[in-house]
Image: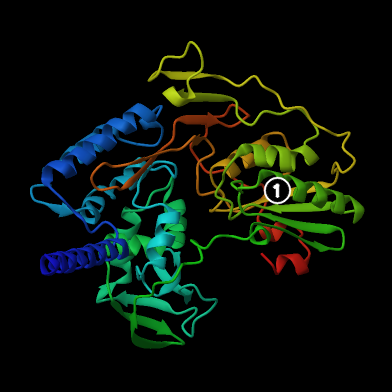
Amino acid sequence: MRLIAAYCTILLLNFALINNSLASNAASEPFQHHLSTAQAIEDIDQWFNWLHQTHPDLSHSIADIDKFYEKVAQIKTTINEPLTAMQLWQKMAPLNGMLADGHLKVGHGSSSQWRQWINEGVALFPFEVKVTQGSLIVERELAKQVSQYTGAKIVSINGKSTAVIVRKLLNNTHGDTPAFREHVLQSQFNRLFYMTFGPQKSFTIELEHNQKIHRVKLKAQAAIPSSLAQQSFADAFNITYSNTTALLTINTFAWHDFRQFLDYMDNTFSEIKKRKVNHLIIDIRNNGGGNDDMWMAGVLRYIADKPYKHFSSYRSKILLKYRDPGQIVGNVEQGENTRLIQPQPELDNFYRGKTSLLIGTGTYSSSIVFANTVQDYQFAQLIGTATGGRSTQSGGIQFMSLAHSQLQMISPRFLLTRPSGIKQMTPVQPERSLSQANIPQALSNLL
């Protein structure tokens, strides 16, 4: 009996080791589990039905709805044998270009999932890059500040030309406009490369550097890209002064501690008054959005000198968890925004000087709504370059993981038109370029 018990224990230990090994491999290689053809098609149908139950109007961003439906049907016809979850994403991802909205996405994993996978050993392309007009420029080694190849142009990766690689990656990237998709690809390059071309242990990279061609072979790196690194408060919010000009950087409206943000902004505007600042520049070029309450309570509270509303009209799909009495789930409700937010000029630290809002391609979501409001009510002059996203924004994003593949899908539930009532499907345009904004050299050097 002891021998049988010992033998069973050994079998159980071996079985546990095998299971742990399989779990470890699964953890280190996301989306490598296999799906049957029926499971893959069920996942597509699940997403397709959920999308129509969630989005208020797909024609908002999809230029040709018939072509979109045909493409979805065509993808399903190509699934005639088992495939991995990653291969299913590779088939579905080109729909992102047709969806043409930064809040509408055929996704893969969340940021927190990717951080976990990388910490467990998932290895990525070893450079962080700048994507510009179809080219890839080395910015730094993965998770480091620089590289000996910083500034080098990547000519090819594993024998594929950069032009071919970038074209394929952009085809799989979500976003409102080509410029915004290029911006998204730059920040998510390592993840999108992994999902598009699969896990790879090493890379043969051809570089053009200092007018010479270099060929290097580098191992994939299990390191967190800077775009995935969790920001400190000082990274997200900071201010620099130069005489009577101040540069206030706000890189997100999604900070987890709302009270911390409000206290910081209140103290900041008190310091601005104390220093007698007469030109405040607010930089939201790298602000991907978040919660409108943050900029209403944290910024406009101190600079808005007239009543305002942050959108003029809306269209919203009624979802059960957000339903108000009398609303029917599944209906699309639309109407005008009649709520005016009152100014607070009586505040001791209310700011009355000149304000400039610095925008760029990376200004998106709630920060576009902020820019719309500031521009339409002339609370500040917009400077910089056009936003990558449209003036008319979608929002209220919802998440859903597909049953078999566990791919993460995203869809908005409402659409907002800017306060002026002009329904613009074009980016927010600045009134002046950065060079025309008369920014002191000390601050300009930081931009």
Quadrant (top left, top right, bottom left, bottom right) of the C terminus:
bottom right
Tag 1 residue: 261
Q: Nearer the viewer, residue 9 or 321?
A: 9
Q: Is residue 51 above or below residue 37?
A: above
Residue situated furthest front in the rendering: 1
Quadrant (top left, top right, bottom left, bottom right) of the N terminus:
bottom left
Q: Position of residue 389 (x, y in %)?
A: 50, 45
Residue 377 falls left or right of residue 207: right
Q: Nearer the viewer, residue 367 or 35?
A: 35
Q: Position of residue 356 (x, y in %)?
A: 73, 49
Q: Position of residue 233 (x, y in %)?
A: 66, 58
Q: Amino acid at mark 1?
A: Phe
Residue 355 falls left or right of residue 276: left
Residue 291 falls left or right of residue 143: right
Q: Position of residue 165 (x, y in %)?
A: 30, 66
Q: Is residue 82 above or below residue 418?
A: below
Asked whether residue 426 is in view, the answer is: yes
Q: How many marks?
A: 1
Q: Is residue 199 above or below residue 406?
A: below
User: What residue lies at 75% left-to-right and 65% top-to-bottom?
Assistant: 443
Within 10 angstroms of label 1, few (less than 14), some, or many (20 or more) residues? many
Q: Nearer the viewer, residue 55 or 152?
A: 55
Q: Quadrant of residue 337?
A: top right
- Secondary structure under badge 1? helix
User: What residue lies at 61% left-to-right and 49% top-to-bottom?
Assistant: 255
Residue 402 falls left or right of residue 56: left
